[in-house]
Image: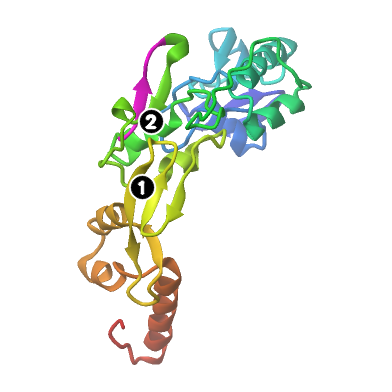
Amino acid sequence: MIQVIIDGKTCAAEEGEILLAVARRNGIDIPSFCYEEALAPYGACRMCLVEVVKGGREGITTSCTLQVTEGLDVLTESPEIIRLRKALLELYLAQAPRSESIRALAARYGVTRTRFTKKTVRDDPLQNRCILCGLCVRVCRDVMGVGAINYIGRGQFTEINTPFFEENETCQGCGACAEVCPTGAIAIEDIAPNRIMKSWSGTKVPLKTCQSCGRYFAPSPFVDNTLEKLDTALKAALQDLCPDCKRKEMTRQAILLSTGTPLPMK
């Protein structure tokens, strides 16, 4: 273990650990839009900028890519950092004018309007809330192993969507993209018997039916792919049950096991 100093506070950390993770573990809030623990550091949004005072290359850098070393001393809210964050937030207010999370963070820094032209697109599949942080693309590709979406176009015309803006049958409908999206840009709706990935060219993913209560409960491809990784007996017992019925059946089994009279799954 080593010691680093963040805003004057001495914090314990492991050599090579990411500064942003160390700060948050110690109750120091550094804003970020593109950081996700399940993914490698990316440094795309630049919101997590910090100022290195000593113990490393002095100057401004992203805390999500900065590996800590003994004696590192950084400031997370220096006048220069605040100035840069305000400028970035003005840009994001223009790029994603309908994102509540962007507006909330901007208000925290006293930014209520932008000098830049707002980018408002009628019928935007990402609801004029996308800042191109790339989390959705990376979690779909690197964590879920699917790659159903990607960047399209270049420069100011860059977008994120399915190839050729067409329905993509490789999408599992897992919703991981929406889960990690920091700006609430991704719209998903369950309309039986499908999950509609509204932001991803209306891609339709069939929903699975619970064999106990008859309700639709999760995208079939995602459930099947997940179950393939489970123990055979557990997979057979739970594969066609919705979350509520899984919980009830597992509770039932736990009670029966406690009395020494386990019964087969219903």
| Amino acid at dot 1 | Gly
Q: State which quadrant residue 197 falls in.
A: top left
Direction from residue 141 to residue 42 in the image, left or right = right
Residue 72 visible from this viewpoint = no
Residue 92 visible from this viewpoint = yes
151 part of magenta stretch: yes
Residue 212 image position (x, y, % from top left): 36, 77
Q: Nearer the viewer, residue 121 or 42?
A: 121
Residue extent of the magenta highlight:
148-154
Residue 59 image position (x, y, % from top left): 60, 7
Q: Residue at x 46, y 36 (%)?
A: 37
Residue 72 image position (x, y, % from top left): 58, 18
180 part of magenta stretch: no
Residue at numbered disc 2 = 137
Q: Secondary structure at mark 2?
A: helix
Q: Residue at x 71, y 11 (%)?
A: 83
